[in-house]
Image (tube, rainbow, N blue to C red):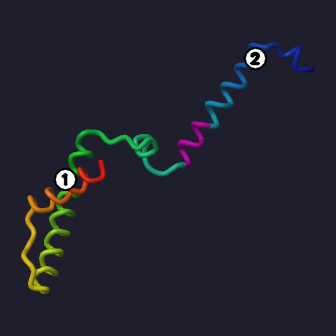
Amino acid sequence: MTLASIGIGWMLLIFFGGTFAFFFALGKMTWGTGADLVDWDPAERQAAKMELDAEDAMDLLEITNRRRRANGLEELTQDDVLAQIARRNRDVG
């Protein structure tokens, strides 16, 4: 039996079937969900991530102010930090 006698239709069916089976098996072997693989965040996950980022920023500001108090410097506020970032972005851009 040669490839020519199988027919192009069967060869295409075998090719696409094998490709589908390969990616299906690959998906089953990976961790997480399909959303994790493509780095897709639904709105709820994005909101939770933004909340954690805001908490981290507040923690960093508190640590910075603790160090500034120990050195006898004035504490920074959120507005001070945002103004510094805006000034830095204006200088770069």
Closer to the chain start, of discs 2 and 1, is 2
Q: Which residue does the numbered mark 2 point to in the structure image? A: 10
Q: Which residue does the numbered mark 1 point to in the structure image? A: 86
Residue 7 pos. (x, y %): 81, 13
Residue 27 pos. (x, y %): 54, 42
54 part of magenta stretch: no
**Left or right: 43 in relation to 78:** right
Disc 2 on helix, strand or loop? Answer: helix
**Left or right: 79 in relation to 59:** left
28 vs 34, nearest the viewer: 34
Q: What stretch is highlighted in magenta?
A: 23-29
Q: Is residue 13 visible?
A: yes
- Displayed quadrant of residue 64: bottom left
Q: Which residue is drawn at 17% across and 60% down?
A: 84
Task: Relative to 80, say whether 29 is above or below.
Answer: above
Q: Which residue is drawn at 13% across and 86% down?
A: 71
Q: Residue at x 23, y 43 (%)?
A: 44
Disc 1 on helix, strand or loop? Answer: helix
The amino acid pointed to by label 1 is Ala
- Dominant SS in magenta: helix
31 vs 38, nearest the viewer: 38
Q: Which residue is drawn at 63% across and 34% down?
A: 21
Q: How far apart are marks 2 and 1 (CA)?
A: 63 Å
Q: Is residue 49 visible?
A: no
The amino acid pointed to by label 2 is Trp
84 vs 43, nearest the viewer: 84
Task: Relative to 58, say whether 22 is above or below.
Answer: above
Task: Relative to 67, say whether 49 is above or below.
Answer: above
25 part of magenta stretch: yes
Q: Residues within 10 Å of mark 1 (few under 14, many from 20)?
A: few
